[in-house]
Image (tube, grey):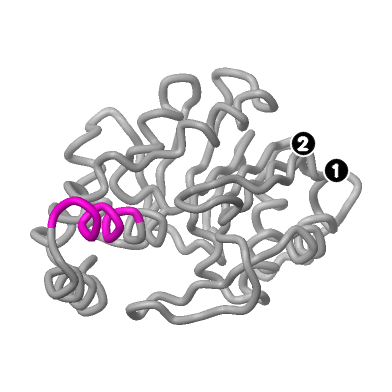
Amino acid sequence: MFWCLIKSSLLLIKHYFWGSLHLEHIENRMAEDYYNTKESVEEYIRLAKDVNGAELIAKFKRFLPSNSIILEIGTGPGTDWNILNQDYTVIGSDNSPEFLSHLVSSNPSGRFIELDAITLDVQESFDGIYSNKVMHHLKDIDLINSLERQHEILNPNGIICHSFWKGTGSEVFKGLFVNYHSEKTLRAYFEKHFEILALESYAEFEEADSMLLIGKKKNNTTTKSKRH
């Protein structure tokens, strides 16, 4: 969700609060240390307070029964975690210690773990896995490895739900790698391990600028574990 929140925050600032000079200042701060201090994370959370994946989660819920156990990859400020937690048991995860500190203090009854989105080094299994604008930070080979690992840690018939920015190619924006995807590339990466239940474009800021994929674990495929 990091890139989603950054882009949303910057657009809000641009349109409603400051001019281009102030926008550039905020962008530069994000690039330098935006996830490394308590103060910057608090500012980030405040700027992105109106961004959430409620519409995506509503579609996810069509395929995953209530009370299922979910892993959220890239929980960030915890906005989507709180929505998911209304119907599911959700284990939040992030690789930012500052965000994890915020999540733990804001949700003392919740469970949050430090986790890499590629290796997903956990010892348990889940009914569902969710992320919102997180997986596009992975290079193609890393996405493939992450999907293999997601398949491993999902229970039979487990459901995944991931959103991406739609497009072609990749770029580095303010220090963040962004890998754009199309329906064709997502099918190519996901169909080995998942039956695609929904794959559609939607508007985050502009018409059809994003992709949502919901899939079900294929139980007749095997993966080669890289963990020892």
Asked which quadrant contains residue 196, the reply is top right
| Real-space Cα separation, disc 1 to disc 2, in angstroms | 6 Å
Q: Can residue 228 be seen in this snapshot?
A: no
Residue at the spot 61% in from the left edge and 37% down from the top edge = 128
Q: At which x and y percent is residue 130?
A: 55, 43
Mark 2, secondary structure of its residue: strand
Residue type marked 1: Asn
Q: Residue furthest right?
A: 220
Q: Which residues are magenta?
A: 8-17
Few, some or many residues within 10 Å of mark 1 (<14, 14–19, 20+): some
Rendered location of residue 126, percent (x, y)? 60, 38
In this view, 68 is above or below 176: above
Front-most of residues 147 and 156: 147
Check disc 1 and report the residue beneath it: 219
Mark 1 touches mark 2? (CB < 8 Å): yes
Residue 122, percent from left and from top? 52, 53
Task: Residue 219: tell me if it is visible.
Answer: yes
Left or right placement of residue 39 versus residue 223 in this view: left
| Left/right of residue 4 with respect to residue 37 in the rendered view | right
Q: Is residue 11 magenta?
A: yes
Location of mark 2 (residue): 156
Q: Residue at x 26, y 77 (%)?
A: 31
| Residue type at the position of mark 2 | Pro
Residue found at the far left of this picture = 39
| Quarter the C terminus occupies | bottom right
